[in-house]
Amino acid sequence: MDPPHRLLMGPGPVNVHPRVLRAMSADMLGQFDPEMTRYMNETMALYRRVFMTENRWTFLVDGTARAGIEAALVSLVEPGARLLVIQAGRFGLLLSEIGQRIGAEIRTLDIPWGEVASLEQIEAAITTHRPQVFAAIHGDTSTTMAQPLAGVGAICQRHGVLSYVDATATLGGMAVATDAWGVDVVTGGLQKCMGGPPGSAPIT
């Protein structure tokens, strides 16, 4: 294989950083190798810093960013459960599509594309729809808007709602303050701000 060099200037994938390319060419290790365990623990510790969390369960899902989203939603949402999604761009629609495949009862907080939801709108929607799970996109590629999430975790906890955030477009590019937001699960991808290849999905 000899793929041509491209300057990738779309929303993702982006060009992979040379250090990442060098690391990808390193020798394979078996999953039971002590060195593999050491690398895994180091990776988990480093991703805690990226996610701004103390959560021990911060690791990589072996798959695309969408695999991380699906892993999170399948773990949080049971068939028949009510899922409330902020729909303010293409990727909010994706969360609803995945929720439908799981068998969730979908409710949406519809916001005009190019705008974000206020805390008051989010709490009103949670009060009205009484979901088991609330889901939001931190940064929607289709609109370039970043949904403010400070205070969202507290609202969800007050109403007994689990919370999920997809930070694929923002992880590594702006603060993803998992612990400060108080959200339960956050996932991301490597192919945007992280400057890595698609195929690994960080999750906490």
Image (tube, grey):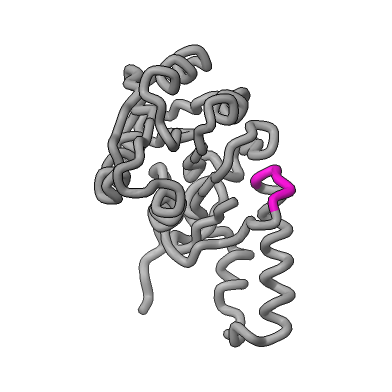
In the image, residue 125 above or below residue 133: above
Q: Quadrant of the N terminus?
A: bottom left
* Observer able to see residue 7: no
- At x 40%, y 46%, the residue is 77
In the image, residue 87 above or below residue 52: above
Question: Which range is magenta?
Answer: 51-55
Q: Is 140 on the left-hand or right-hand side of 158? A: left
* Observer able to see residue 24: yes
In the image, residue 30 above or below residue 72: below
Q: Is 69 on the left-hand or right-hand side of 29? A: left
- At x 47%, y 42%, the residue is 166
- At x 45%, y 48%, the residue is 76
**Residue 24, quarter of picture:** bottom right
Q: Position of residue 188 (x, y in %)?
A: 51, 49
Q: Position of residue 27 (x, y in %)?
A: 60, 85
Q: Position of residue 5 (x, y in %)?
A: 41, 62
Q: Nearer the viewer, residue 138 or 104?
A: 104
Q: Is 128 on the left-hand or right-hand side of 182? A: left
